[in-house]
Amino acid sequence: MKCAYILILQFVLVSVALSNTLTVDEAGNVVAETDRYVARFKDGVLVHFHNKLTQETYTLPPQDDSNEQSGISIQYNEGEYGRYILIDEHWEVVESKRLAPLSVEVAYYSDYRVDKTVRMRISIDAATGDLVIQQHGTSERVVSIMWGCGYLNSQKLDVIVPGNGGEIVNAATDTYKRGYEYPERWEAQLAILQGGDGGFFVRSTDTTFRFKKLRYVPSGEHFGISFQTDNPAPFGEKKEITSVAWRLNVYRGNWQVPAEIYRNWMETTFQPTQPPAWVKELEVVIYLNLDLEVLPMLAEYVNPSKTLIYLLGWQKPTPDGSTRIPDYIPAPEFGAFLEVAHSYGFRVMPYANFVSCEPNHPLYPEVEQFHLRHPFRGHKLGYRWDDPSYPHSTAYINPASSTWRKYVVGQLKNVYETYPIDGFHLDINTLFRNDPNGLVEGLTFPEGNILMHKELREAMPGIVLGGEQVHEGTFFNTNLAQRWSHDNKQPHPISSFLFSPWTIPYGFHVPNPDGEPELYQARQEAYVVWDVLPTIRIRAIWMLRDKGLVRTHGFLKSAREGQSWEQTWNIETGMDIVGDVNGDGVVNIQDLVIVANAFGKAEPDLNGDGVVNIHDLVIVANAFE
């Protein structure tokens, strides 16, 4: 039996070895084949890719030069952006070698302007079948290194990107180059290329938050994509770079197949914080100013226990109207507002800022050395920092500074220990930048950002942290996240699929559906796709009293009645008809008679002025069908 087992094991190992083959010739051409795919590389570019699972080929025959290439980026002069130097026929293949049975390496060299070498290692992971691509480059002032896929068929592939909230990039709408920088705009290091019956996906399993970039380059009937890894700034003394390992594989089915693989990896790797029960039960988020008067009436329009108040204007202003960020001194009525809000069952999440410091704040001279700078040009960065017309500009401070973290955490902890708040919204908390100040106390900017989130949670046990946007570096510490919706032509639910089990999205300063219907619709369309928690701003109590704001009231009613998030965003569906007093679905003479007979009474008060009068009669008359 032991001999039989050994023979069977040998047969299995031989079969696996035969199903995975990797060849390289002297010109640097590489062919990789497994039982799932066939891939061919020329000049470091993937130029042919075939999915054996679906019998789909995702590339077109090479046509002239590839529209996406592999290469290196070099900063020739201080203050300039890096220049892409891409591998072409002028580069020399100086070495092609086999490193292992399933690993080869090709070295490309060029001496134009400066000596530079790019080594490209291509391997097959026998355990997963992944095609693994990793590069090493040497030169002066190395900024980044990248590899590309060219001649991809634009008629057969959609690029699904967890970027800008989640979107599809294809020839239908994207005729210009597009770039996504990880992690702020490219929220997870994953790209899915969806074909008819399946597709392929590229991902990295880097856990150090190296800065990366995904580029999309259209060219008629085909397009290219590239995957870039950056050096940490400053670049002046950098003479080499090693990329992260990029993993490529195919699948059968829709985009959720690779997305689930990646999400499972994210969960195992980052151990995200589970949201508390009350967050999972939320029906609506209401943006409010610090106004006690609005709370009793708001409680009639929503289910308070399932409503989160995003609280603005809660800090005590200074004489010049600023808030002295990063000081968090509540206004005198803040405590009373919380007491009333909680008496109805509302949850309250005040606004706070994660990295901003006003230049006139006493702390700024101490942390000025940690003021974030542009990675190439070196100038200071902040909110409207270079706008002399704006009196309240703020500096962005690198959170790797323990001085900065200690001060901000202490300020917010003091509020938490004094007042019964439920959460904090952390503005600009997804800021992960390649800071040319270099390491601060041994930490990169992303590492400092993550540590600050951790210290906030430890200082305020049970607090719920919300943030502006969400990405791979923040989702495991935040349970709520605002979602922008601009610059997104074809929204796709990929980012919500990846993050929503732990971080629930809500709207970003949503325009009023009555006052700004066109702006509202632009947000609404993306928010429905992304399954965003219904969000609306109530600027003052008159908005609740004014029954003429029919979409606003329809929105609140839909949330109160527990309709789906999609139905609430699409507030025309199931909304009360203005002037339909008897609820028969049409405005006619019967409604007019009811209002006329109720003159002087409290109901049916259609305009919210407290009495039935001629104004209510006009509303009904104008709504006649």
Image (tube, rainbow, N blue to C red):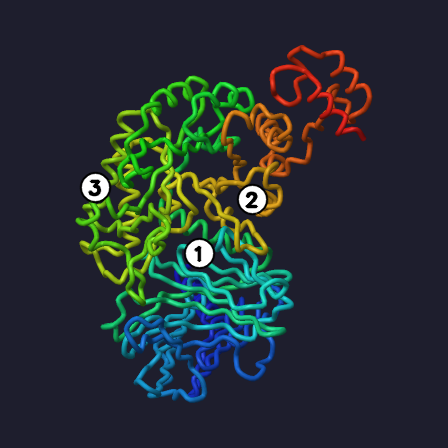
Mark 1 in CB contact with mark 2 (< 8 angstroms) = no
Q: Name the N-terminal-most of marks 2 and 3.
A: 3
Q: Position of residue 170 (x, y in %)?
A: 59, 63
Q: Where is residue 266 drawn, in percent x and y?
A: 41, 50
Distance from label 1 to label 2 (Cα)?
A: 17 Å
Crowdedness near tag 1: few (<14), some (14–19) or many (≥20) residues, C-alpha within 10 Å: many
Q: Nearer the viewer, residue 319 or 182?
A: 319
At 55% from the left and 52% from the top, the residue drawn is 256
**Mark 2 residue crowding within 10 angstroms, few (<14) / some (14–19) / many (20+):** many
Seen from the viewer's position, the closer of residues 603 and 202 is 603
Q: Secondary structure at mark 2?
A: helix
Residue at the spot of label 1: 185
The amino acid type of the residue labelled 3 equals: Lys
Q: Using the image, tell me which numbered label, if any, was put on residue 406.
A: 3
Residue 28: name its quadrant. bottom left
Q: Which mark is residue 527?
A: 2
Q: Residue at x 64, y 30 (%)?
A: 550
Q: Earlier in the sequence, mark 3 or mark 1?
A: 1
- Residue 256 drawn above or below residue 89: above
Q: In this picture, is 150 found above or below 274?
A: below
In this rendering, the answer to whether 368 lies above or below 503 is: below
Question: In what element is the residue under mark 3?
Answer: helix
On screen, residue 87 versus residue 360, left or right, reads right
Across and down, in percent, residue 271 comes to: 36, 44
The kind of residue tagged 2 is Tyr
Dot 3 crowding, Cα within 10 Å, few <14, some 14–19, many 20+: some
Q: Quadrant of the N terminus?
A: bottom left
- Disc 1, SS: loop
Which residue is at 47% across, 33% downward? 287
Residue at mark 3 to residue at mark 1: CA–CA distance: 28 Å
